[in-house]
């Protein structure tokens, strides 16, 4: 039985499996395409988990805030991260605990970071409930993997949240400055969020979505 995922929408696929590329043939993701356009084909090849045989997932403390908040807000699950009983990672014990957490597939986070993550999630929930998106997290699924084919090319995407009617995708991002104009001038384009939006919609339409 093949371990590859066929074209379609898939639920409950672990993050590690998605990022390792579960398609039958090496596929393009929004991140790979952003690297291709912003850097070079060689950079895109190096970042691809199936083309570069020495590829390893990028792990950095700077991603841990967003990853933990992401899990808590969208999945309501704190079991995906591990609280490291330390003030920082200067000690060997803390470094080993962080390493063990990553090996186990969990996001390491320090106690003071956890406090901030809880605040971030609470603010996000309250902000959403004041908009036209109120109640959206009660009518959909988190971490939906989309796989589709266009001619001989395979593509994959992972929606943070997809509503049950497939009419709306929520893409939750953590940023240091959320003021709309500054966000549009900065990370929206520089980090390829505009490309991701177009890519997500393309995939959903390719799979028969509205």
Image (tube, helix red, strand yellow):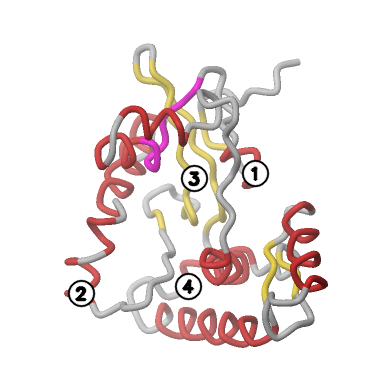
Cα distance between the residues tagged 2 and 3: 26 Å
Task: Return the x and y of residue 99 as percentages of the image width and height.
Answer: 75, 59
In-image side of 184 versus 129 (left or right):
left
Q: Toward which corner of the image does residue 24 lie, by quadrant?
A: top right
As displayed, is residue 190 above or below residue 181?
above
Cα distance between the residues tagged 3 and 1: 12 Å
Disc nearest the viewer among 3 and 1: 1
Residue topped by disc 2: 182
Task: Return the x and y of residue 75 as percentages of the image width and height.
Answer: 63, 63
Disc nearest the viewer among 3 and 4: 3
Q: Quadrant of the C terminus?
A: top left
Cα distance between the residues tagged 3 and 4: 21 Å
Q: Quadrant of the N terminus?
A: top right
In-image side of 148 versus 39 (left or right):
right
Residue topped by disc 1: 16
Which labelled disc corresponds to residue 137? none
Task: Return the x and y of residue 26 as percentages of the image width and height.
Answer: 50, 22
In terms of sequence position, does the residue under pointer 4 or pointer 1 come before the other? 1
Report the magenta residues as a range. 26-32
In-image side of 170 versus 108 (left or right):
left
In terms of sequence position, does the residue under pointer 3 or pointer 1 come before the other? 1
């Amino acid at each position: 039985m093949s371990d590859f995922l066929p074209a379609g929408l898939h639920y409950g696929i672990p993050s590690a499996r998605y990022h390792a590329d579960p398609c039958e043939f090496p596929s393009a993701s929004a991140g790979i395409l952003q690297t291709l356009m912003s850097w070079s084909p060689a950079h895109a090849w190096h970042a691809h988990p199936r083309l570069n045989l020495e590829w390893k997932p990028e792990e950095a403390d700077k991603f841990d805030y967003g990853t933990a908040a992401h899990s808590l807000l969208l999945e309501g699950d704190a079991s995906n991260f591990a609280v490291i009983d330390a003030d920082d990672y200067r000690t060997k014990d803390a470094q080993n605990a962080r390493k063990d957490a990553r090996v186990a597939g969990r996001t390491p986070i320090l106690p003071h970071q956890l406090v901030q993550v809880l605040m971030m999630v609470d603010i996000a929930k309250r902000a959403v409930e004041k908009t036209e998106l109120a109640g959206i997290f009660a009518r959909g699924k988190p971490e939906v993997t989309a796989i589709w084919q266009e001619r001989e090319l395979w593509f994959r995407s992972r929606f943070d949240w997809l509503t049950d009617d497939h009419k709306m995708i929520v893409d939750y991002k953590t940023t240091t400055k959320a003021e709309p104009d500054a966000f549009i001038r900065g990370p929206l384009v520089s980090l390829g969020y505009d490309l991701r939006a177009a890519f997500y919609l393309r995939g959903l339409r390719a799979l028969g979505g509205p």
